Image (tube, rainbow, N blue to C red):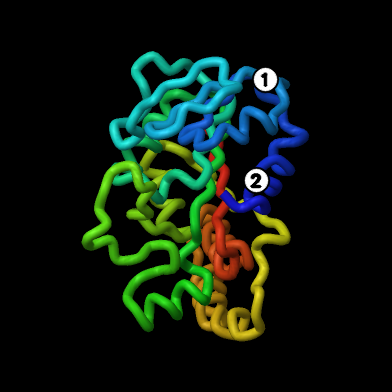
Amino acid sequence: MQPFIKQAVIEFLYDKSFSTVLDAPAGDGWLAEALGGRTGVDGVDLYSNPKGYRKFWQHNLDEGLPADCGSYDLICCLEGLEHIGNPLLLLREFYSRLSPGGLLVVTTPNVWFPQARLQYLWRGFFPSFPCLIGKISPGTHMHITPWSWPQLYLFLKLAGFQHPEIVTGHFAKAKHLHERLFAIPGRIYCWHRARQAATEEELSFWQTAKSDASLLGRVLIVVAQKD
């Protein structure tokens, strides 16, 4: 996981209060270490077995969460959802395991940013989502499910979450002028759809869709709360 993603997540969580956390997938265990013992952190991962977690399960997230997971104030799925073949199952499991008012944080590569769209136009594959023929092997952390803001919003809503939001920051900026220019048609389209919105939810969705975080960010950081 790139350092700027870790920094953005920790900055977002810094002033928030939670007593129980689930880190799924846990990876190398950096989140438990970063939270510095301020809370009880459980972890789930199929391939790693890091230290520092209160409880830890080696478990395939394509099958949902372990049956004996508890209830959590915060669930973090950081750079994990793109590896999952059954994302709706997992997101519904996250929803069911969150306490009322609990928060889900998801980070994943954003296939809406201009360079990704251009590469898809040229090759038919998004960056970090290459053709895997001849390389399909469990345990290689394959990127198999690409995400954009509209797609992630849809899946979160289907899972039961009501108000998904994008976290903004310095990471959601264009690196090159041509990227900002290439994003203009999409921004105009989203702006037009926002003007036609019939509900507050539609308006909020399209306003977010035309934001830098949605159109230009290489990574999506999305949060959703359980009502």
| 91 left or right, relative to 174 | left
Residue beneath the point at 36% across and 36% down: 90
Return the residue found at the far right.
15
Tag 1 or tag 2, which sits nearer the N-term? 2
Determine which residue is flagged by label 2.
6
Residue beneath the point at 35% across and 51% down: 142
| Between 145 and 215, the one nearer to me in the picture | 145
Establish if 116 lies above or below 79: below
Amino acid type of the residue tagged 2 in the rendering:
Lys
Give the image location of residue 48, x and y in percent: 45, 32
| Between 155 and 119, the one nearer to me in the picture | 119
- Mark 1 is surrounded, within 10 Å at the Cα level, by few (under 14), some (14 to 19) or many (20 or more) other residues, namely some
| 130 left or right, relative to 11 | left
Give the image location of residue 2, x and y in percent: 60, 53
Q: Secondary structure at mark 1?
A: loop
Give the image location of residue 199, x and y in percent: 50, 56
- Mark 2 is surrounded, within 10 Å at the Cα level, by few (under 14), some (14 to 19) or many (20 or more) other residues, namely some
| 133 left or right, relative to 29 | left
Give the image location of residue 201, x and y in percent: 52, 53
Residue beneath the point at 61% across and 35% down: 30
Q: Is residue 227 visible?
A: no
Q: Quadrant of residue 74?
A: top right
Q: Quadrant of residue 41?
A: top right
- Point out the frontmost of discs 2 and 1: 2
Amino acid type of the residue tagged 1 in the rendering:
Thr
Q: Is residue 77 visible?
A: yes
Q: Secondary structure at mark 2?
A: helix
| 158 left or right, relative to 19 | left
Determine which residue is flagged by label 1.
39
Return the residue found at the far left.
134
Establish if 159 lies above or below 110: above
